[in-house]
Image (cartoon, rainbow, N blue to C red):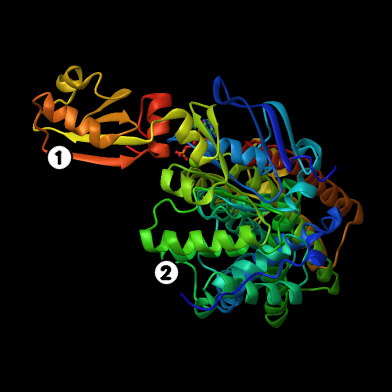
Amino acid sequence: MTSDEPLIHASGLTKRFGDFEAVKAIDFAVQRGEAFGFLGPNGAGKTSTMRMVGCVSPATGGELRLFGLDPATEGPRIRARLGVVPQKDTLDEELTVEENIWVYGRYFGLSKPQVRARATELLEFAQLTERARSKVEPLSGGMKRRLTIARSLVNDPEVLMLDEPTTGLDPQARHVLWDRLFRLKRQGVTLVLTTHYMDEAEQLCDRLVVMDHGEIVAEGSPRDLIREHSTREVLELRFDVDDHAELAGRVDGLGDRVEVLPDRLLIYTDDGDAAGEKVHAAGLEPLSALVRRSTLEDVFLNLTGRTLVD
Amino acid sequence: MAADPTLPTAASTRNTPEPFPRSRRWQPVFAFWATQYKRTWQGNVVSRFLMPVMFLLAMGLGLGSLVDSSSGGVDGMPYLQYVVPGILAAQSMWVAMGESSYTVLGAIRWQMQYHAMLATPIGVADILIGHIGWVASQIALATGIFLAVGAAFGAWASWWVLLALPLTVLTGLAFTVPVFAFAATQENDAGFSIMFRFVMTPLFLFSGTFFPLDQLPAFLRPIAWVTPLWHGVDGNRDLATGSPDWLHLLGHTAYLLLVVVVTGWLAYKAFRRRLVV
Ligand SMILES: Nc1ncnc2c1ncn2[C@@H]1O[C@H](COP(=O)(O)OP(=O)(O)OP(=O)(O)O)[C@@H](O)[C@H]1O
Ligand SMILES: [Mg+2]
């Protein structure tokens, strides 16, 4: 393959489980060195897609190439060049932290001395050196996740695939993890990740696709997506009512678009303060009125009519 | 935050080598199970010793002296020498079933170690060969210990008993491989207790381990002939008592090999269906 060809290329990629189509003929391409994300709610088909790209789940239809190779026939050769962080950790909880890396390195054909040397570096990188001899089971969620990432790097992969790397972690642990991922990216590792956190997508991804019900509904950089599919600002209004839908009619026309959520109204506009004044002028008295910038959450809401995380 | 460790990903190491040869990919799987074993090996080895000691004391000396004094042994030999080769074979069945049921389902469902392996160049066949190879080594270890303990009790009448080691490992494999296939079809461990109760226990009792098959009603004998255990029991007994009938032994070996090959194919299918979705 030539250097300007995408590292990962999918066209019409489809996954069916029985009659159910989890991934519906999606197209995407990932370039070397970029951080590429799949953003979508539960059941969107993110994991199904990642597993096909990771060459552990055969595609039902369409074409998929990694490094120009076909997963159907070249699975082991491709997997030798990938690092995989699955949604659910597959660490061996009864082995120690370092043993988990040693064992895993051997799966790539590394020798005993090679995996030992590599484990020392990786544990340093994942800030787990002090826990090297401890069993995995009692580690915190954040530490286990870092260990899974450390383990996935044992073969010095060109592409690191992360399926919801920080789901279930506290904010502090998430930031530590993001920091490690930035470092890898700076060192030229291509990142492919899924998330249903818009802040994670905004932080980490150069480019992302928004997935819903097995389809890609939008694609672009976080900034482009927001520009294209949302307004610059959002005015969030909370009223002292049981059902915010009642009030939707009264704010109609105060912005470019209105979204009704169970607990608040969102008015999309390029000037939030001006919209806020119009709300008061119309005689409405919200409990709170907050102006903020648009996020990917708003993009998703606009595209699908639903929120990402419920 | 501490230091600023960066990962050495120099251009020189960037060119990922071709994955190591396919013929060696079962080895790290074997090495993984060995690493796990290292945590508990002391207790494991002790129980591998205690098992034959208990059986030799109870069956050989206890029951044996009763049988010998009341009927002069079985087929003209002391009961100890009659029964112990059979128990040797039966032990390989226990070890095989014990090592192939919960561990396999756990590696699929709970601890998911197989899934970790499949994200690397390791494939389904490598997983099967590496893991079954590991179980075979466990059976060999248990059998070796049993042979040594049996020798100390005078249970073997002939040096031919050394050939019982490979035959017993093969007998164990003829249980290991089908249980791998079975385990890969299970959702939870309920099926295993049924297997232990309704397959292993009857086989243990009615495969000629304790008394000759011709004591059984004629219609039950063919059941013993098709299950692997009787082949191991009968072959071991031939060898241990120093009267090997080579044609018989060849037949037993061929039958056990057939079981391993046929169920090996089934296990491969079951593993693929379960793990590659
Ligand atoms: N092995 C399977 N058999 C049947 N259906 C499956 C299987 N795996 C996934 N699905 C279904 O496919 C759909 C997509 O699942 P997938 O796990 O890819 O979604 P996801 O975007 O990763 O969701 P989440 O955010 O919850 O991880 C879901 O409806 C799921 O129930
Ligand atoms: Mg998922």
In this image, A69 relative to A232: left or right? right
- Other residues around mark 1 within 10 Å, as few (<14) / some (14–19) / many (≥20): few
Q: Nearer the viewer, residue B26 or A19?
A: A19
The chain identifier of the residue carrying mark 1 reads A
Q: As drawn, which residue projects farthest toward the bottom?
A: B152
**Label 1 SS:** strand
Q: Is residue B51 left or right of residue A276?
A: right
Q: Are marks 1 and 2 on the same chain?
A: yes
Q: Nearer the viewer, residue A201 or A121?
A: A201
| Residue named by callout 1 | A288
Name the residue located 32 percent from the left edge and 29 percent from the top edge.
A268
The answer to whether residue B85 is seen in the rendering is no
Q: Which one is nearer the viewer's eye here, B209 or A310? A: A310
Within 10 Å of the Cα at label 2, are there few (<14), some (14-19), or many (20+) other Cα atoms? few
Q: Quadrant of residue A53?
A: top right
Name which residue type carries label 2.
Pro
Q: Residue at x 70, y 82 (%)?
A: B152
Q: Earlier in the sequence, mark 1 or mark 2?
A: 2
Asked if residue A36 shows in the view, the reply is yes
Residue B241 spot, x, y in % from top left = 80, 67
* Label 1 – label 2 distance at C-alpha: 44 Å
